[in-house]
Amino acid sequence: MKLGLLLWNQDAAWPTVVDAAQRADRVGYDMVLMWDHLYSIAGDGVDPYRPIFEGWTSISALAALTERCHLGLLVGSNPIRNPALVAKMAVTLDHISNGRAMVGLGAGWFELEHTANGIPFGSGFGERLDWLEESVSMIRALIDGETVTHSSAKYQLEAARHAPRPIQAHLPILVGGNGVKKTLRTVARHADLWNTMGPAADVATRDQVLREHCVSVGRDTSAIERTLEFKPIIRDDLAEAERVWAESLANAGTTPTLIRNAWLGSPAQIVERMRPYRALGFETMIAELPAPYDPETIERLALEVKPMAEAELAAS
């Protein structure tokens, strides 16, 4: 099983971000990720003007402060940046990190942060998904050293070609989202990793759709790494886990009733929650934590939950 840590950018002090990333790197996480938002987002009705760090500069800084974990966004808001610029940034990050960059992309959903900052948001979700398909295709080609000419209503590239190449032979692209018609088709065509969340039955339905898209585009579905996002607090006492969770969310200006996918409890209870997803082939679990990033949860996920889950699989 692989582990990722997604650090909420909002209401965070930078030394706390560094401490959490280095702790995760030290205890064996495979990836450390951050949001890509210009305004704060956590919970319905949250003040959008709460403090929040920008994503790409954050993970680039962490690249120089960590040693083994991959670094990326979960996920980059595609409308915010030109895809050719994203490709150049990703390769630069790969060199800063000595081969640990990931490109995370999604269609974007928070209209206010786009329109307030002068970023076109499109006519609707369908159009943004079309933009995402175009972008992922161009980014993949540019990272792989191809020359790209592309002309559409949104993007125009004229014989774009980048150097240097990444350190990684194949710099991975993660696409996040649940749209069955367009997003999952983009995943099937281009992504190395797919991220989703939610009840196991819903995830199973989406996974089946992804498999059907893979058949239609001629892609081996096993080539796509499945990643699941969840929000844990680990304590042996459930009441204490609930207290820590509520306190963490209060720091971000929200409450437990407004946040989905919280997994609270002991290591054994977390393993039990993982079980139906792992049965579907989701072997990368990405823990999402609000600042100040509970250190006990970070460490116990890697040092207790992961070995327990792997031992369970080995015994089955």
Image: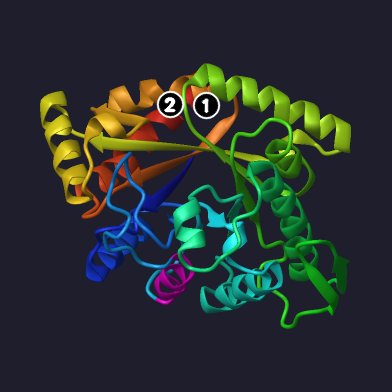
Image coordinates for residue 118, horizontal then vertical, percent: 53, 68
The quadrant in which residue 209 appears is: top right
Circle 2 sits in a helix, a strand or a loop, which is it? helix
Residue at the (24%, 37%) spot, across then down = 233
Of residues 129 and 203, which is closer to you in this image? 129
Q: Is 65 left, or right, of 127 in this rendering?
A: left
Which structural element holds mark 1? Answer: helix
Rendering coords of residue 208 (x, y %): 69, 22
What residue is rendered at 52% in x and 26% in y?
278
Q: Residues within 10 Å of mark 2 (few under 14, many from 20)?
A: many
Q: Could one spot residue 188 in this view of the protein?
A: yes
**Label 2 with label 1: CB-CB less than 8 Å:** yes
Q: Is residue 126 magenta?
A: no
Q: Which residue is mark 2?
A: 274
The range drawn in magenta is 55-64
- Is 118 placed above or below 301 here? below
| Amino acid at dot 1 | Arg
129 lies left or right of 257: right
**Label 2 to label 1: alpha-carbon separation:** 6 Å
Quick check: is 60 in the magenta stretch?
A: yes
Judge from the rendering whether residue 315 lies leftward or rightward of residue 280; answer left or right. left
Task: State the residue position of label 1.
Answer: 278
174 or 258, nearer to the observer:
258
